[in-house]
Image: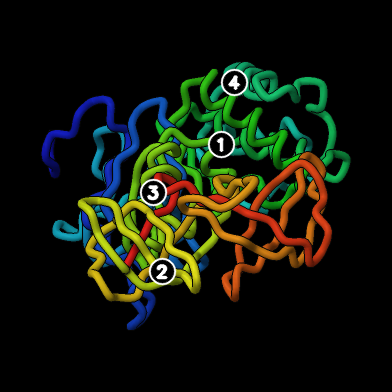
Amino acid sequence: MTDQNKIPSDIVLSVDDLHLSYGSNPILKGVSMQLKRGEVVSLLGPSGSGKTTLLRAVAGLETPHAGTITIAERRVFNSNSGKDVPAEGRNLGLVFQSYALWPHRTVFDNVAYGLKLRKVAAGEIRERVNEALNNLGLGHLQERFPHQLSGGQQQRVAIARALVYNPPVILLDEPLSNLDAKLREEARAWLRELIMRLQLSALVVTHDQSEALAMSDRILLLNQGRIAQQGTPEEMYGDPQSLFVAEFMGSNNLIKGRVRESRGDAVCIDVGDWSLWGQRRGTVDSGSEANGLVRVAAVRQVDGPGDNRMRVRVITSMYLGDHWEYLFDGNGTRIRAHGNLPLAADSEHWIEIPAERLWVFA
């Protein structure tokens, strides 16, 4: 294999030390990642973190300044040798946020268009388009035009168009963002099922952490052009390695305090009139200010005082359909929690923050 070191055969996409700037503004600052065959990896992060730029660089729509990109054991970008295969030569399936369907072409012709440009025989085009449309439940809509379809159906046409090439990797840029909230939940389930059933290798850009958790085998969380942490959804949610990752990956309470005592990995912080034990994350020095973080769902209502408990006052109760969310005040510390019944404003209650669920960061 030329122009590259040997990459394991189960790796269909490899990005190594990628740098990319817009003028004097660095966007990617040495990003490295791999995508395995049959794996779904989500690029997650706040606006400006570099996730869409990374996807576009892999697609050949942006040119990095340094690094390498390898797709299906074929190097398509190498800054040292000057190699840069154009987008149309990378054999990738692309699904854009806007879907980018031809409004004057039927569903069949939208999906078939790229094959016709590649001079594929008419019989093979018909067979491949039918297969792609049937896989997405669109076989009966072949003669309709985009304006005659729902948003969810248009999205499936865009995905069928990406799949018709049988690409080694499919790239999806915010694929569910144009759908309403209810349809998004349904769509992420069938999209995950489709990817698993067809054993696709997918790189997905999303800003929605719930979407990333639901769809992914692995998540890469970017921040300011670098990978802050990567891992399985369970690892990202349950074992964050920094305050940024912990805050981004859930619905949280941030509790500011001062470190009173440390016992190995256990740390006690003073929060107003209360003392709370938690789990150390990184270097946390006695006497220093600290940030405690606990998931909203981990806070429990209890009957009375005890370890890691606080007396709080209800500010408001909010009905969310399958549960209530409460906003409490504990002598200036605001804490949210979930429950099954409404609580009266200004009523007082005890809550417990389990020590094993409270992470303490510097």
| Residue at mark 4 to residue at mark 3: CA–CA distance | 33 Å
What mark, if any, has residue 214 been given in the picture? 1
Mark 2, secondary structure of its residue: strand
Q: In which quarter of the image is residue 192?
A: top right
- Bin the neighbour count of mark 4 within 10 Å (Cα to Cα): few under 14, some 14-19, many 20 and up: many
Question: What label does residue 220 carry, if any?
Answer: 3
Marks 1/2: CA–CA distance: 36 Å
Whether pointer 4 and pointer 2 mark residues with C-beta atoms closer than 8 Å, the reply is no
Using the rendered view, name the quadrant where residue 144 is placed: top right
Which amino acid type corresponds to the residue marked 2 in the rendered image?
Answer: Asp
Image-based side of 16 in relation to 252, left or right: left
Q: Which colour scheme is used?
A: rainbow
Identify the mark nearer the N-term, 4 or 2. Answer: 4
User: Position of 163 compared to 143: left or right?
Assistant: left
- Circle 4 is placed at which residue position? 128
Q: Does residue 95 appear in this view?
A: no
Q: Earlier in the sequence, mark 1 or mark 3?
A: 1
Q: Which of marks 1 and 2 is nearer the N terminus?
A: 1
Q: What residue type is labelled 3?
A: Leu
Q: Which of marks 4 and 3 is nearer the N terminus?
A: 4
Q: Is residue 209 above or below residue 234?
A: below
Locate residue 89, reporting x and y percent.
39, 43
Image spot of residue 58 (x, y percent): 38, 50
For marks 1 and 3, give the CA distance: 14 Å
Task: Residue type at mark 1: give it.
Answer: Ala
Distance CA(mark 1)–CA(mark 4) = 29 Å
Image marks 1 and 4: residues in contact by CB distance under 8 Å: no
The residue under the point 63% across, 52% down is: 97
